[in-house]
Amino acid sequence: MTVAFVGLGSNLANPQQQLLDALHSLTEAADVRLLSCSSFYQSLPMGPQDQPDYLNGVAKLDTSLSANGLLDLLQSIEQQQGRVRKAERWGARTLDLDLLLFGQQQINSERLTVPHYGLAQREFVLYPLFELSPELILPDGTALSVLVEECHSKGLRVVFNGADVWKSVTGSV
């Protein structure tokens, strides 16, 4: 089994429900066990500013899938929830699931880059990831805490706390 971290984001079609549905889909997936999930954070869009704010979070899971197998699952969930891939970079979307970390592996293929290429600069990834694993050391030896200290929050704010997210997804505390 490999511990993986998945970034979740949405800014269309009831973003909170989109993220909860994605987490629920992960709990039902074969070869995946959801371990924890962060609070949901509201963040400003990275790209064009004429779109709604995003809701972001991070899920920690255990999986027996390969990194590419997990990516296939994530893309399948996105598609089931109405994700349409457009040429526009950083545009509005119903759901965005990014494989952030896959154990301590470093992967750089045509299809997949792990750790996720933008992880170190994105407050909407770093803060929820830190919430789940404050002692995390990235595959290159960098402490997550150092990245969080160097990254301004840019107005990021919690809108749905992690305990309530977990309860909504699993039905337990």
Image: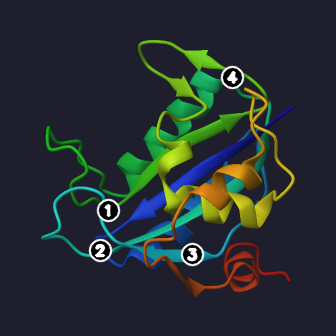
The secondary structure type at the circle numbered 3 is: strand
Disc 2 target residue: 13
Mark toward the start of the polypeptide (1 vs 4): 4
Above or below residue 123? Residue 171 is below
Quadrant where the image shows the C terminus = bottom right
Across and down, in percent, residue 160 comes to 59, 85
On the picture, is 2 further left or further right than 73? right
Disc 1 target residue: 94
Q: Which amino acid does label 3 sit on?
A: Phe
Mark toward the start of the polypeptide (4 vs 2): 2
Instruction: Name which quarter of the figure residue 103 lies in.
Output: top right
Q: Which amino acid does label 2 sit on?
A: Ala
Which residue is nearer to you in this view: 136 or 145? 145
**Residue at the image position 73 percent from the left and 22 percent from the top:** 105
Which residue is nearer to you in this view: 78 or 36? 36
Give me the C-alpha separation between circle 2 and circle 1: 6 Å
Mark toward the start of the polypeptide (2 vs 1): 2
Mark toward the start of the polypeptide (3 vs 1): 3
Mark number displayed over residue 66? 4
Eye-nearest disc, 3 or 2:
3
